[in-house]
Every structure is written in C-alpha cells, then in structure tokens.
Image (cartoon, helix red, strand yellow):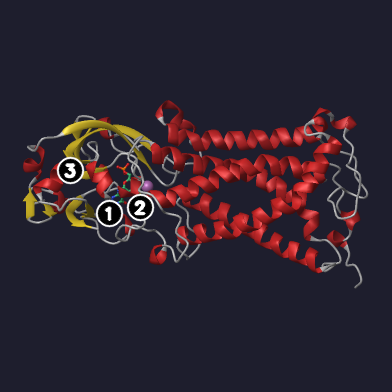
Amino acid sequence: MRQPPGPFREQFWRSPLRGPWLASILGSALLPLIVICALTGFLSQAAYNPSLGDNSPLPGGGIGINLYFFSWPTSPSWIYALTQGLHVISGVMAIPLLLVKLWAAMPKLFEWPPFRSLARSLERASLVLLVGGSIFVFFTGLGNIQIWYPWSFSFVPAHYYAAFIFLGALALHVTLKLPVVRRAFREEGVVRPLRDDRAHTRAEPAEHGTTAPVEPAPPTMSRRTLLATVAAGSAGLGVMAAAPVIGGPIRELALLAPRGQSLGDGPNDFQVNQTAKAAAIRPAQTGPDWRLVLEGAQRVELSREELISMPHCTHDLTIGCVEGWSTTQSWTGVRLRELASLAGAPKGSDVEVVSLQRGDGFNHAVLSSGQIADDRSLLAFKVNGADLSLDHGYPARVIVPGAPGVHCTKWVKSMTFSQA
Ligand SMILES: Nc1nc2c(c(=O)[nH]1)N[C@H]1C(S)=C(S)[C@@H](COP(=O)(O)O)O[C@H]1N2
Ligand SMILES: [Mo]
C-alpha cells in the first residue's frame, strides 16, 4: 500500500517532547486518578442500594453486572459526600492529563501501514475502545455535573457500561505498556527530563513504533513547562471541583458548578437540587390539607402539627449529591424508626418513600432497614431551627446519614413499610 501524505507520514509529527518517557509520565500520573474515580464510581452504584425496590439506576437492576454486595452504611454521615466528591474531583482532575495524553499519543492514530500483524491490529482495536471509551466516560460525566445532557440516552447506564469498556481496554493497555514504561524510566530516569530547560530539551531517540519524532522540530517549551501547565490545570480544576464538596466560604471557588448560586434565605440558604417550582409542587398540596400517610400493619395519617408533636431530635447531617456537591446542615425531625413503629412496620422492613412530586425518578426512593434503624435518620420538618423552605421539601423531607442526596426525598407524601 502506498503511504498517504500528511499525518500518515512519520515526518509529519515533529514535537520534540513526544516519546515514550512523556507517555509514561503522563500515564503514571493519570492512572491513580482513574483508579480512584473507578472505585468511587462503583461505590456510588452500591450507595443506591440497587437491590431495594427500583432504586437501581440501571435498567433491570444492572443486567448481570451488579457489583453491589453489601448494605451501604450510614456512618460516617458524610461517607457518600466523600466517595462521590472523590469521584467527581478525580474525574475532573484527570481531564487535562487525558487530553495531553491523547495529544502525546496522536501519531499512533495515523500509523502506517495500518495492519502490520495480527497482534498489532488487535492492540490498535483496543486503542479505539480505550480512546473512545475514555472520551465517552469523561464527556458524559462532565455533562452530568453540569446538568447538561446533549444526548438522548440515559446517563447512568451509558456512563456505567462504558466504564467497563474503558477500564477493560485500559487494563490491557497498561499490561502491554508496562515494559515500555519500565524501559523509558530506566533510560531517561523517572524525573530527570524535568531538569532540562528549553535550551537543553532534546527529543527522545527516534525508534520505530514509538511516538518519538524522526525529524524533531526545535522545542518551543520544555517538558517541565508542559507538565507544569497540565498539573496546574489539573490542580485548578481539582480545587473548583472540591469547593462545592467542602463548602463554606471556599464554595465561591466552584466556578464550574452550575448549582453554585444560592437559593433560599436565612437558615434555608443552601444548595437546592430541584426547586419546588421545577418539581411542579402546587401550594395547595403543601397547605393545611397535607397529610403524611404511613402504611405498615396499619395505615396512619398525620397532619404537620401531629408530626411536629411527636418526639423529635436534631442532628447535623450531610446531603451528598451525585453531581459532586454536598452541604451539612442541622436537621430537626421525627426518627424514621419512630414512624415505622407507629405504622406497625414488620421487623426488618424497608420503606418506600413517595413524594408529592410527580414524574421523574427523583420523586421516590427505597430506604433499607439499616438506614431506618439509624437514630439519625429523620423525616425532617425543620432545618437550622427554621421551618423547611418549600424548595428544601416543606412540609417534610427525608434525611438519612451517609445516603446519596437523591434518596433524601423532599415533599414527602407517603411512607410504605414492608418486609423485603
Ligand atoms: N421530591 C424530590 N426529592 C428530592 C429531589 C427531587 O428532585 N425531588 N432531589 C434529590 C437530590 S438529587 C438531592 S441531591 C437532594 C438535595 O436536597 P436539597 O435540594 O434540599 O439541597 O434532594 C433530593 N430529594
Ligand atoms: Mo442529587
């Protein structure tokens, strides 16, 4: 086959920075972030308690690939805020590294001839899954935290199953490239190339099958400038992603978070996921006619006054949202355990909580017996000493320590206790 012109010729790729060492250092920096992101991603799935009711965000509960094998804990109460925060922070921090890694590997995309041997062809096919999978997983993840869905498929299953493809291809890639990394670090040193300023920057030896250029251009920057720029970008994004997790005054640094604005006022002035308006909650539904319906061995209806007159308590609890923000507030309400016994719930019951809100998947959730049993799990009617605002779930909302925010149902209408 005649070699086509342009990028299909080795001479086209001239950056003196490209080569096995650069690929190795970028890969080594990227790998820990991806490992953290993957582990916390799978934990997020477990946190939904997917075996309860229709809690699983995956169709059919996970079609065979369900890594859920333990009951999500309620302690520490910020566990989900932490794991999901790490998922979003590590994922966002990986993006600049990933982009530069793709740039560094670009000549591979145009290697000619495309079919040299079966082994090489299989490796290249796996690169399609690696590159395509990584772009897909990071792009959809970024879209989700921006609440921006420029696609018509369902986010969670697509993001979840694509992660398997990406991670499978990555495992193969790491295995195949380990000798290359070893050799690059042995020959160039792990950090030695960082000592060279621009004047001393030399291309790595051009060898067939590597990304080191055969006709290097003069350097326009040193490797350390390139890596420092990427590291600064990664760290900057990390701070912006960590700000809404940590909260407090540094929340202002959450320049990437679309929910960075404050909603509500006074004691209710903290992050809102979906406003009452967006959830189409009508004032009449939350007025004096509102009743909380409890179903267990018996059916009990409570007005808000009756709910408030029950024994209640106050706890500082964290809402951790899947989108990577969290907020800790002081919640007052009746223990779920108390409501379970009032309804005559059978021992070991789960509870399905249903909202006044209609439609979307946010309007109900199933909580486990372990979550009900925790003394801090509340049907809250106050926050920070004031009545809940309509946006935070007035007349009453669930708050469960350690649970994903999405299970802390607002505008609760009914709670049905039943044995799993
Ligand atoms: N009925 C209802 N409850 C809901 C939601 C919702 O959209 N509708 N959003 C959930 C999500 S995803 C989160 S993170 C928390 C956020 O609670 P907040 O809006 O009071 O901060 O509420 C949860 N409860
Ligand atoms: Mo959320």
Q: Could you tell whether 331 is left or right of 101 in the image?
A: left
Real-space CA distance between mark 3 and mark 1, rounded to the nearest whole angstrom: 14 Å
Whole-number angstrom distance, CA of label 3 to CA of label 2: 19 Å
Do we see residue 221 in this rendering? yes
Q: Quadrant of residue 76?
A: top left
Is residue 393 visible from the viewing direction of this image? no
Is 1 situated left or right of 268 in this image?
Answer: right
Q: Is mark 3 within 8 Å of ligand 1?
A: no
Question: Which corner quadrant holds the N terminus?
Answer: bottom right
Q: Residue at x 45, y 31 (%)?
A: 252
Instruction: Please name the residue shown 10% across and 44% down the image.
Output: 304
Can you identify the residue that label 2 sits on?
49
Identify the secondary structure beneath mark 2: loop
Does the residue at mark 2 contact the one at mark 1 (Cβ under 8 Å)?
yes
Q: Could you tell me which secondary element the residue under label 1 belongs to?
A: strand
Circle 3: element type:
helix
How crowded is the residue under tag 2: few (<14 C-alpha within 10 Å), some, or many (20+)? many
Task: Name the residue type under label 3.
Answer: Arg
Which residue corresponds to the image point at 85% horizontal and 36% vertical from the top-left?
188
Q: Quadrant of the rendered structure where residue 84 is?
A: top left
Residue position marked by numbered label 3 in the rendering: 337
Residue hosting label 1: 366
Measured Cα–Cα span from mark 2 to mark 1: 8 Å
Near-viewer residue (311 or 229):
311
User: Where 125 falls versus 89 (above or below)?
Assistant: below
Q: Is mark 1 within 8 Å of ligand 1?
A: no
Three-letter residue code for mark 1: Val
- When asked about the image quadrant of residue 164, the answer is bottom right
Q: Is residue 145 above or below residue 187?
A: below
Give the residue type at disc 2: Asn
| CA neighbours of label 3 inside 10 A, class few (<14), some (14 to 19), many (20+) | many
Q: Position of residue 149 (x, y in %)?
A: 48, 57
